[in-house]
Amino acid sequence: MAGHSKWANIQHRKGRQDSIRSKLFSKLAKEITVAAKMGDPDPEKNARLRLAVKEAKSNSVPKDVIDRAIKKSQGGDAENYDEIRYEGYGPDGVAIIVEAMTDNRNRTASNVRSYFTKHGGDMGQTGSVAFMFDRVGEIMYPASAGDADTVMMAALEAGAEDVESDEDGHWIYCADTDLNEVSIALESALGESESAKLIWKPQAPAEITDIETAQKLMKLIDTLEDDDDVQNVTGNFDLSEDVAARLG
């Protein structure tokens, strides 16, 4: 569950999606369970749960998996997870934020640190790279939702702060605390979105033009994402068109 691909440019890894499908489902289900346990098990009364369920559906998680995750939160044997953010630098000084949910802080911290070290990076202290990102809500719509002007007007009326559109679709950004409200308002104007979630948006992503650096960076991100405790990985980089094509 890497960060926003429009910024991180990791869509070249689409071929890998089938192999990580079950792992992705497991991570989305974990978020649903945690969200339901922390609040009301009814998505209509729990904003975080509503967004978690929406994200799961956008990734084709079966309804029975979603229902089981919610039900699990209400059982006495539901695991207790700590939400932790790790920060560090990857190859060529790329800033990376790792979000995790774990039942063993020592295990997860040790694993994440070893991944950074093994793949030419360095895990830093909390806050060491977060200042290079903005914590925002991101709502994605397909290009078919309307032209750029139509989507921009709807987004602003819904309380969003910014919109970016291209031939692939529309990315609508809002304050992190407004995500649920903006998402609901947009559904009335544009219909169901493809995704609505909180992200770390790079303020000034650096373009990677060296294929060797890109390969090392992708290996680090892949390794981080493969860890069961890691929920999301975001980097402040873009891949040049040439490098993205060669990696693809």
Image (cartoon, grey):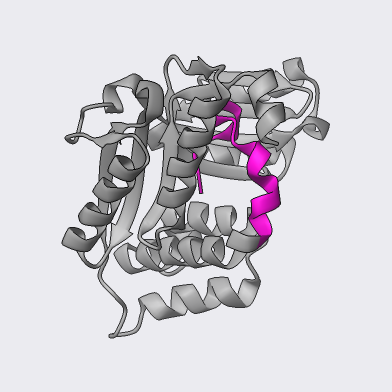
- Whether residue 16 is in magenta: the answer is yes
Residue under the point 42% across and 60% down: 31
| Whether residue 167 is situated above or below residue 82 in the rendered picture | above
- Which quadrant of the figure contains the C terminus? top right
Q: Residue at x 43, y 42 (%)?
A: 220
Q: Quadrant of residue 193?
A: top right
Observer-nearest of 193 and 232: 232
Relative to 25, is 111 on the left or the right?
A: left
Q: Is residue 171 visible?
A: yes
Q: Position of residue 195 (x, y in %)?
A: 61, 44
Residue occupying the point 42% across, 66% down: 30
Q: Nearer the viewer, residue 210 or 156?
A: 210
In the picture shown, does residue 39 fall above or below 160? below
Q: Position of residue 206 (x, y in %)?
A: 47, 16
Q: Residue at x 67, y 25 (%)?
A: 154
What is the chief secondary structure element of the magenta stretch?
Answer: helix
Magenta stretch contains residue 113: no
Magenta residues span 1-18
